[in-house]
């Protein structure tokens, strides 16, 4: 009878240690998750700000070239068109990212 009690005490102690160990690991993971979650929220704010800047840049480029003078010039027109396409692609990308959230 004493052997059974000793075995039960040993098993209970080892299970208690295992549960305590798992609880510590769970709390550490939960703290790390909270840090990542706050970093993700900060990234969302930056993404929203970036989308606003891209919209402003696109509108500014459109207003600068109202009469098409930049597009008519060979060298300047090439650079202008490339920049315009890049800004449009970024606008589509960032607006798509915002709509998914």
Image (cartoon, rainbow, N blue to C red):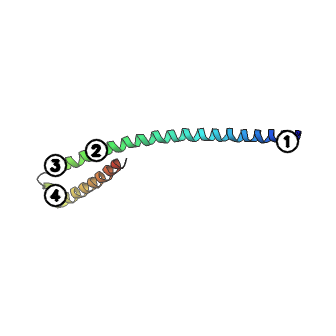
Q: Considering depth in this image, is 21 or 68 the residue closer to the camera?
A: 21
Residue 86 located left or right of residue 28: left
Q: Considering depth in this image, is 24 or 67 the residue closer to the camera?
A: 24
Q: Earlier in the sequence, mark 4 or mark 1?
A: 1
Residue beneath disc 3: 64
What residue occupies the far bottom of the structure in this picture? 74
72 up-or-down from 25: above or below: below
Separation (CA) of disc 2 from disc 4: 23 Å
Separation (CA) of disc 2 from disc 1: 73 Å
The local crowd at label 4, few if under 14, some if 14 to 19, many if 20 or more residues have their Cα within 10 Å, is some
Separation (CA) of disc 1 from disc 3: 88 Å
78 up-or-down from 98: above or below: below
How far across and down, in percent of the image, does residue 14 sit?
75, 41
What number is the disc on residue 48? Answer: none
Say if mark 2 contacts mark 4, CB within 8 Å: no
Residue beneath disc 2: 53
The local secondary structure at tag 3 comes to helix
Say if mark 3 contacts mark 4, CB within 8 Å: no
The local secondary structure at tag 2 comes to helix
Residue beneath disc 1: 4
What number is the disc on residue 71? Answer: 4
Q: Earlier in the sequence, mark 2 or mark 1?
A: 1
Say which quarter of the image contains residue 83: bottom left
* Image quarter (top left, top right, bottom left or bottom right) of the N terminus: top right
Residue 89 located left or right of residue 18: left
Q: Earlier in the sequence, mark 2 or mark 4?
A: 2
Q: Earlier in the sequence, mark 3 or mark 4?
A: 3
Label tally: 4
Q: Nearer the viewer, mark 1 or mark 3?
A: 1
Separation (CA) of disc 4 from disc 1: 91 Å
Separation (CA) of disc 2 from disc 3: 16 Å
Residue at coordinates 22% horizontally, 58% vertically from top-left? Answer: 81
């Amino acid at each position: 009878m004493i052997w059974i009690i000793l075995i039960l005490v040993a098993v209970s102690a080892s299970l208690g240690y295992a549960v305590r160990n798992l609880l510590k690991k769970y709390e550490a993971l939960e703290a790390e998750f909270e840090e990542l979650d706050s970093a993700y929220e900060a990234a969302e704010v930056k993404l929203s700000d970036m989308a606003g800047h891209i919209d402003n840049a696109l509108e500014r480029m459109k207003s600068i070239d109202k009469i098409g003078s930049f597009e008519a010039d060979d060298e300047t027109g090439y650079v202008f068109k490339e920049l315009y396409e890049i800004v449009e692609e970024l606008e589509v990308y960032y607006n798509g990212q915002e709509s998914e959230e």
